[in-house]
Image (cartoon, rainbow, N blue to C red):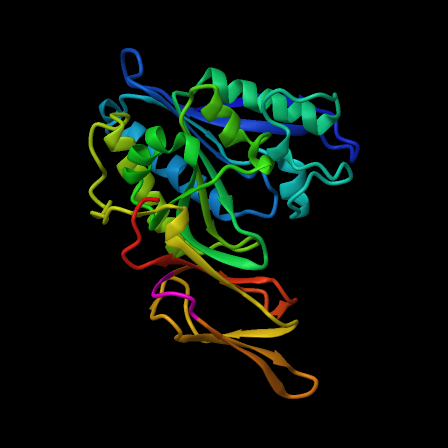
Amino acid sequence: MKTHTLLTRNSPLGAPLKIIKQSFSPHRGKPVKRISFVSGLHGDELDGLYLCHRLIQSLRHISASHPEDILGEVHIYPAANPPALNQGTRLWPYYGSDMNRLMGSHPGASLPVQMAQEIYKDIKENSDIVVDIHASNLHLKELPQIRIIEEFSEALVPLAMETHVDLVWVHPMAGVFESTLGYNLNKSGIPALVIETGICMRIDPATVDRLFHGMMHFLKQQGILASLPENIPDLPSPRVIFPRGVAQASAKHSGLFVSRVKLGQTVGEDEIIGYVLDPVKGVVLEEVTSPVSGQLFTLREQPAVHAGALLVRMAREGAKKS
């Protein structure tokens, strides 16, 4: 393993800011393929850091015990936004900049822009495939999933199937994606898979273990690893859903949402999934029922809701490609 300091910048807070990359190269010969794992672009998303730890730990062990099994090149950027990670915030402190909205061609010369552009350049120059790892916000909890913009689905869905996440969600393009790492890499011809999982400011070890096992399978499928370590279990293929295969329920009233279901659970149409309450008056404002039969892959975690707030997303049973 080689540790690279991509860049160092002086910080307004005094301590220098460093972005670190850990790299693993084949024991001999040229790499069959180069892959990069990126986490921590948002400083409140921590599952990705733990996943990178698991990957580094495992690859370091393979490199020491069976170096001939590493056939490709693996680059891991575990903490891509150190200032936000240090503060536990989604955005770059003091600047209020979202580092995942500063990728690709971007004007400006602020410190966040400089660092975003440097990391984007390094990833682009050293990757044939990229996995960009994110967590949800404080409001919603997500099943481990890969999200793919429709225009890239033909190239990315076959790759996503090799990761063995729970779900692959193909969704429409939105303007907010235009400056993200994943979108810009895909537009430039470098396949980038975007993972969304869990909830921010938390680590779910069981979920990360599942993702870790899936990523090891992916490395094997891509020819980067010659074989899987003995402790990696077989995993089912993910379910692929397209826009018409997704249903959701939103709150009709402001109040306190109390869930009666669990993330990942399959429920029937019109089944009760929770209640919106007025805790001051002691009344039930709304009985929330499932809009369709299917699996809950997004569930409201923050109880305080306003009218229109998203409560659940569901993968419809028997949904087909739109």
Quarter residue 284 falls in: bottom right
Instruction: State yes or no: residue 292 in magenta.
Output: yes
Q: How many marks?
A: 0
Q: Quadrant of the C terminus?
A: top left
Q: Quadrant of residue 310?
A: bottom right
Please provide percent x and percent y for residue 314.
41, 59
Residue drawn at the location 57% of the way across and 30% of the way down: 178
Residue 102 coordinates in the image, percent (x, y): 64, 29
- What is the residue that sits farthest to the top in this orientation? 29
Q: Residue at x 53, y 55 (%)?
A: 202
Picture residue at 78% right of the left edge, 32% below the top: 14
Q: Position of residue 313 (x, y in %)?
A: 45, 58
Q: For the view shown, which residue lies furthest in the bottom direction?
A: 282
Q: Is residue 166 above or below residue 195?
A: below
State left or right for residue 135 relative to residue 245: right
Q: Is residue 215 above or below residue 73?
A: below
Q: Decide if residue 298 is in sight here.
A: no
- Residue 144 visible in the picture: yes
Q: Is residue 101 magenta?
A: no
| Residue sitting nearer the eye, 244 or 251 | 244
Q: Position of residue 268 (x, y in %)?
A: 34, 71
Q: Nearer the viewer, residue 161 or 53?
A: 161
Tell me which secondary structure the magenta stretch mostly adopts: loop
Q: In which quadrant will I find the N terminus? A: top left
Q: Relative to residue 5, is residue 144 depicted above or below?
A: below
Provide the residue span drawn in magenta: 290-295
Instruction: Answer left or right for 279 relative to 151.
Output: right
Q: Nearer the viewer, residue 272 or 304?
A: 272
Decide if residue 216 is on the left or right side of residue 190: left
Q: Residue at x 65, y 83 (%)?
A: 279
